[in-house]
Amino acid sequence: MVNQEGLVEGGEIKKCLELVMGGGERGQEVRSNAKKWKDLATEVVKDGGSSDKNLKNFVDEIIQGH
């Protein structure tokens, strides 16, 4: 949760870190999901990935004057 100033307080950060770093089932699930997102992000930005292709297509469209 955030406070009235929009800041995350220390207690909340501690709670989240304990969850993620802990050995419980929920912590393992969070770490597993984080790894999946990391792998997906790595895949789309590498040469030939979808982001790479989309950016190249966008630049080609600009160069061609469309």
Image (tube, rainbow, N blue to C red):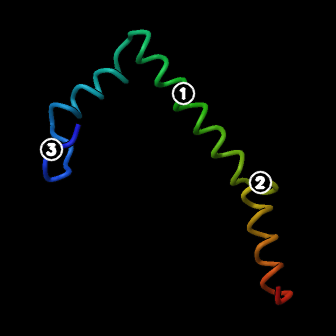
First in sequence: mark 2 vs mark 3: 3
Q: Which residue bears the numbered disc 3?
A: 3
Q: CA distance from mark 1 to mark 3?
A: 27 Å
Q: Residue tagged by mark 2?
A: 50
Q: Residue at left 39%, top 9%? A: 24
Task: Look at 47% across and 16% down and name the residue there.
Answer: 28
Query: Quick one: label 1, few (<14), some, or many (20+) residues within 10 Å?
Result: few
Residue displayed at 38% across by 11% down: 23
Q: Nearer the viewer, residue 23 or 9?
A: 9
Residue 33 bears which disc, if any? 1
Secondary structure of the residue carrying numbered label 3: loop
Q: Judging from the image, what secondary structure is the residue with disc 2 in? A: helix
Q: Residue at coordinates 21% horizontally, 42% vertically from top-left?
A: 2
The three-letter amino acid code for the residue at tag 2 is Ser
Which is nearer the N-term, disc 1 or disc 3? 3
Q: Position of residue 19 (x, y in %)?
A: 33, 21
Q: Secondary structure at mark 1?
A: helix
Q: Amino acid at mark 1?
A: Asn
Q: Is residue 20 above or below residue 13?
A: above
Answer left or right for 58 relative to 2: right
Furthest toward the top, the residue is: 24
Residue 37 vertical placement versus 45 (above, below): above
**Residue 16 is drawn in which quadrant?**
top left
Instruction: Please tell me in which quadrant of the rendered image residue 17 appears.
Output: top left
Rendered-image quadrant of the N terminus: top left
